[in-house]
Amino acid sequence: MSDGALSQDEIDALLAGVDSSSLGGGSKGGGGGSEDDRKAMQNFLSGTTGGIAGNLSTMTGAQVSVTGPDVSWESRDSFLGTLPDTVTAAKADYTSGFPGEHIFLMGEDTARAAAALMNKEENIELDDMAMSVIGEMISQIVGSQITDLTNKTGNKSIASSPPEAVNVPKATAALPGGNFLAAAYKLNLGDGVSRELWEVFGERPAGSIAQALSGGGAPKAAPGTGIGGGSSGGMGSPSSMGSMLGMPSNVQSVQFPSLMSPAATAQEQANIGLIMDVFMEMTVELGRTRKLIKEILSMGEGTIIELDKLAGEPVDILVNHKLIAKGEVVVIDENFGVRVTEIVSPNERLSDMN
């Protein structure tokens, strides 16, 4: 600003630990790459909407439709003006093939509606479980897009980081610096309500993808290039190493989401710090059974109730009535305890919901 004062977006970003130098970068909309790149991306993304709708229909059990997208080059300031005040954002940066920044965003209402359908639960809260469900939804969308992109470009080394969804003020969303490509989809979750879903590509991956789609060839992943231009070890992708050794060129690296995230950003640390002192109910379930009312009324002291668990089977560990882990019962100084033996993956939780 000309008087040296900070905008509200810049103040919010500084409080959340976001680099304010990326705020307001580039021109007010319409900047960035070429019109040819924009058209190439528009044509490609328009062809992926059927796959996105199919995946979401399978996950939600609803008749989902996706139309668009409207694709444009944007700056941070111009794009923030189109977003609601609070958004659910899921980063899914490309780690190889076309490395660079890639993120999905949606309004709170859209995230809540999608999570409620997938979780089969009304009036759902946007808690960790809901964010895990949204992350899995974005993972399915990205997987479908990568398959289409591989088929159209011949680049078999395309991979992305596992999406991690967070609910944040729009000013603190981890958007690319400078100009970037934004695609705005119209999403209908089977209830007749039109909602918006945004997909954002950094200028570099957008240009590389557009070039490959236009017949310019699939760029090679540069050694040492990772998310946001950082270092990934300088050894290239497993696919390129495999080609050098005579292995099949379509072998892709496996993504293993870790239980701990030592490389958490300042924004993520600030967000999780806000809820560190929130209590959650944790219970351990030994087993379950079903009984007729007459059987329950006939119970008395000494009655033995047979459960659906075998002796020695892991017990279920639940947080707010949601299964998150399994464990074994132990005794510590005359008190019962549970040793965690397995963390339930998001995929397993989703299959249990269905």
Image: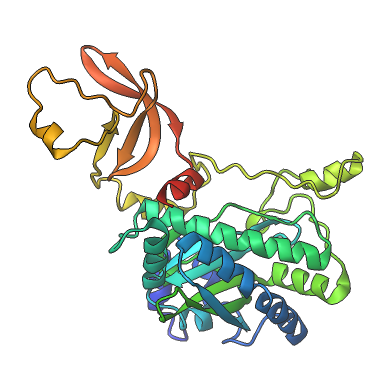
- Horizontal side of 31 relative to 57 (left or right) equals right
Q: How is the image coloured?
A: rainbow
The quarter holding residue 116 reads bottom left
Vertically, is 152 above or below 240?
below
- Horizontal side of 183 relative to 250 (left or right) equals left
The quarter holding residue 68 reads bottom right
- Horizontal side of 281 relative to 92 (left or right) equals left
What is the x, y in percent for residue 300? 7, 23
What is the x, y in percent for residue 346? 48, 47
What is the x, y in percent for residue 97? 76, 58
What is the x, y in percent for residue 218? 84, 64
Q: Residue at x 49, y 39 (%)?
A: 259
Vertically, is 260 above or below 197?
above
Vertically, is 280 above or below 186?
above
Farthest top residue in view: 333
The quarter holding residue 85 reads bottom left
Vertically, is 40 above or below 124?
below
Residue 18 visible within the image: no
Q: Residue at x 67, y 65 (%)?
A: 145
Q: Nearer the viewer, residue 60 or 202?
A: 60
